[in-house]
Image: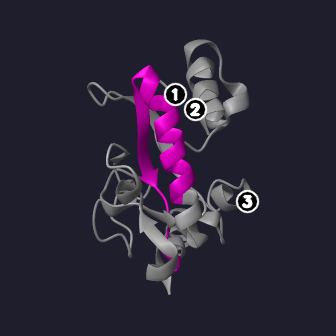
């Protein structure tokens, strides 16, 4: 059923960069999560099509999208929850940084950033991927970080 609902975002627009953080070790757990088999990002067809339109809007400014996460298998969410228990970080659940059920599980949420198309360099967004603090909230940004975040929001 998932195959009929989900599409690889790079099939929508091959210029979208994918860096599937949960397929490797560059995420808050430090390990690949179950269900992430390769450096690929999937979304529901309608969400992937919307992302393709965003990429088209950014292109004239020499910008594009870099996707860190899209569809998240339930087994990956369960592994995240197990990690919070094992490490004593249940606060991340209570604070809403990690969800028991997520729109990622439906293929309707995406974690991403902006990059320069010419060299793939990420724009400064103020925090790294998987930052679990108030600094990651768009409303708390200032200066160039705020401008970059607002540029992404406007394109979306």
Q: Is residue 68 left or right of residue 105?
A: left
Colour mode of the rendering: one colour
Crowd tier of the residue under label 2, counting other residues whose Cα lies within 10 Å: few below 14, some 14–19, many 20 or above:
some
Marks 2 and 3: in contact by CB < 8 Å? no
Is 124 magenta? The answer is no
Instruction: Pick whichever of labels 1 and 2 is earlier in the sequence.
Output: 1
- Give how far apart the Cα atoms at labels 3 and 1 are: 25 Å
Instruction: Pick whichever of labels 3 and 1 is earlier in the sequence.
Output: 3
Front in this rendered view, residue 108 or 52: 52
Residue name at image x 47 percent, y 42 percent: 129
- Residue 90 visible in rendering: yes
Residue annotated with mark 3: 94
- Give how far apart the Cα atoms at labels 3 and 2 are: 28 Å
Residue annotated with mark 2: 152
Marks 2 and 1: in contact by CB < 8 Å? yes
Q: Is residue 147 left or right of residue 115?
A: right
Residue annotated with mark 1: 125
**Secondary structure beneath disc 1?**
loop
- Give how far apart the Cα atoms at labels 1 and 2 are: 10 Å
Residue name at image x 39 percent, y 60 percent: 22
The range drawn in magenta is 48-74
| Residue 44 coordinates in the image, percent (x, y) | 54, 67
Front in this rendered view, residue 146 or 30: 146
Asked if residue 3 is positioned above or below residue 30 in the image, the reply reads below
């Amino acid at each position: 059923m998932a195959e009929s609902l989900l599409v690889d975002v790079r099939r929508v627009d091959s210029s979208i960069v994918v860096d599937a953080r949960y397929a490797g070790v560059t995420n808050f757990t430090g390990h690949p999560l179950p269900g992430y088999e390769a450096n690929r990002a999937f979304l529901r067809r309608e969400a992937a099509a919307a992302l393709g339109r965003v990429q088209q809007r950014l292109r004239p400014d020499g910008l594009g999208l870099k996707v860190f996460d899209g569809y998240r298998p339930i087994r990956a969410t369960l592994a995240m929850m197990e990690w919070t228990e094992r490490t004593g970080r249940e606060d991340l659940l209570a604070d809403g940084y990690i969800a028991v059920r997520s729109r990622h599980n439906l293929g309707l949420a995406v974690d991403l950033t902006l990059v320069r198309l010419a060299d793939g360099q990420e724009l400064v967004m103020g925090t790294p991927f998987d930052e679990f603090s108030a600094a990651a909230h768009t409303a708390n940004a200032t200066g160039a970080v705020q401008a970059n975040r607002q540029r992404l929001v406007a394109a979306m």
